[in-house]
Amino acid sequence: MPRASYIGITVSMVLLGLVLAMWVPVASEDVALEWRGLSLSLHVSGTVVIGLVLAALAGAGMDAVARPLFARGGHLGERVPLWVLPAYVSVAALLSLADLWWGYQLGILVVTGLALATVMLAQFHAANPHSPQRPLARLIVQLMAYVAAVVLFTSLYGTRIRGALLGSGAFLLGGGLALVLLSADEVRPRRVWLYAGIVGLAMGQLTLALNYYLLHERLAGALLLLAFYTLTGLAQQHLWQRLTRRVVLEYAITLLLGAAAVAVLNHWVMP
């Protein structure tokens, strides 16, 4: 099947799922887990279920598009980073639809379809070493990753969920998007996964710490984006063997100035 057909089918299925999420309510469930005397109760909402389904659809579609680029299909360490961004774009669209006028929801659906198709095509060219559009494709992938990061980190912080779930969610978001940004043909997949895991752990700890402060959720999302940008940027420079004191200083100054701006703005907007 042609690459364009896989992209079209994936985008159509995701948009159909988003439309169903707008009009068809999905029941929530309380799940109780017990193991050796320990018990954990989880409230699984319909949004979580739909988000998991959309993420799986987007990831499977991206895998079908990119699989021909890898010899004998490649291995999971190389292919999984390509699943992350389409999945997160789909989840970000689902979260953005909540409590909006139907006209805005329609606009989000149109933007989501265009964004998802663009991401899938850009990731294909970014992963193809023989593509003349590779530099532009990588730039598009990076920009979309940062947009997904600010939307998802803002939404996650705004939920104010319990510590363990909040930290786990931030770890998955930060680590997954770090995989997208750090993956490159000149870097071994094992090192990419290691550094992405470190970024994810750092983002999880930072998000847990911010949960104890009274921050406006959009400003918290901006601060988390700044931290994510700094961590992934430093990791990327180290993987490329370009990390110097000057580079560290530049990233540190950017983070400090951004954090100061967030603190000032938060003082104005919060009572």
Image: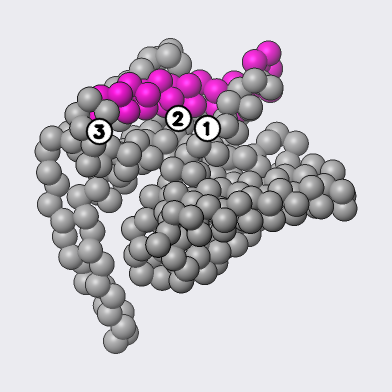
- 91 left or right, relative to 260: left
Which residue type carries mark 2? Met
Is residue 130 located in the magenta-colored stretch of the structure?
A: yes
Residue at image location 19% in from the left, 29% down from the top: 102
Residue at image location 32% in from the left, 43% down from the top: 95
- 259 left or right, relative to 44: right
Residue at mark 2: 62
Which residue type carries mark 1? Met
Residue at mark 1: 144
Residue at mark 3: 18
The answer to which of 245 and 190 lies nearer the viewer is: 245
The answer to whether residue 72 is seen in the rendering is no
Mark 2: few/some/many CA within 10 Å (<14, 14-19, 20+): many
Query: Separation of disc 1 and disc 3 at Cα?
Result: 19 Å
Residue that lies at the very extreme toward the bottom in this rendered image: 37
Residue at image location 50% in from the left, 65% down from the top: 210
Give residue 40's quadrant in the image.
Answer: bottom left
- Label located before the other in sequence (1 or 3): 3
- 109 left or right, relative to 238: left
Query: Separation of disc 2 and disc 1 at Cα?
Result: 15 Å
Query: Which quadrant does the C terminus fall into?
Result: bottom left
